[in-house]
Image: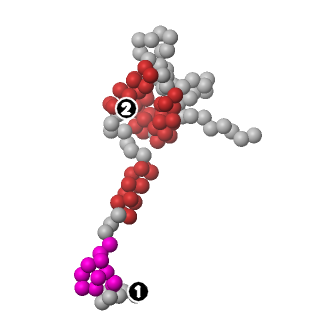
Amino acid sequence: MAEVEREWWIDDAGRNTLKGVYDDPDNPVVLPDEYILDFLRTIPEARESFNRLYPTMLPEEKERLDTLSMSALYIQPDIKVVEDRFQARQNTVGIHTTGPNGGTRLGGNRGYN
């Protein structure tokens, strides 16, 4: 039987640990802000799961998480995003089509046409 993949923020009891609002006894905070910030800064899977779970949160929970994400502007970017941006910059390098040979590589043939 295949094992079902679970979201990073869901604990063994099935609770979403991002949930909760300070000053609401009916919806208490599960994880303190410091823990959430630390996990978001250091664990890529936590960031990905956060982005998937955020739309399912209550408006007041989103407000709390928005405040957290604003204070976490220095979260380490996902390495895949960094690499993709670097590669995109390399793919947009100009092609030289001016000069005495018009970009035909005549005169500077180094073993290829």
Which residue has dot 1 on it? 113
From which residue to which does the magenta span run?
A: 95-105
Q: Amino acid at mark 2?
A: Ser
Residue at image location 35% in from the left, 34% down from the top: 72
SS at circle 1? loop
Q: Nearer the viewer, residue 68 or 34?
A: 68
Q: Nearer the viewer, residue 31 or 84?
A: 84
Instruction: Give how far across and how far down residue 106 sits, in percent.
Output: 32, 88
> Of marks 2 and 1, which one's residue comes earlier in the chain?
2
Q: Residues within 10 Å of mark 1 (few under 14, many from 20)?
A: few
The amino acid marked with disc number 1 is Asn
Q: Nearer the viewer, residue 91 or 25?
A: 91
In the visual, does 100 lie left or right of 8? left
Q: Position of residue 46 (x, y in %)?
A: 48, 36
Inspect this view and state whether residue 46 appears.
no
Report the residue that reaches farthest toward the top. Answer: 25
Residue 94 position within the rendered picture, expressed as x and y whole percent measured from the top left: 31, 69
Residue drawn at x 75%, y 40% as measured from the top left = 1
Indicate how the structure is coloured in the image: secondary structure
Q: Which quadrant does the C terminus fall into? A: bottom left
Name the residue carrying label 2.
69
Choose top left, top right, bottom left or bottom right for residue 107. bottom left
Q: Nearer the viewer, mark 2 or mark 1?
A: 1
Question: Is residue 97 visible from the viewing direction of this image?
Answer: yes
Q: Most prominent secondary structure in the magenta stretch?
A: loop
Q: Is residue 79 depicted above or below 16 in this figure?
A: below
With respect to residue 77, does 19 lie above or below?
above
Q: Secondary structure at mark 2?
A: helix
Extreme right residue here? 1
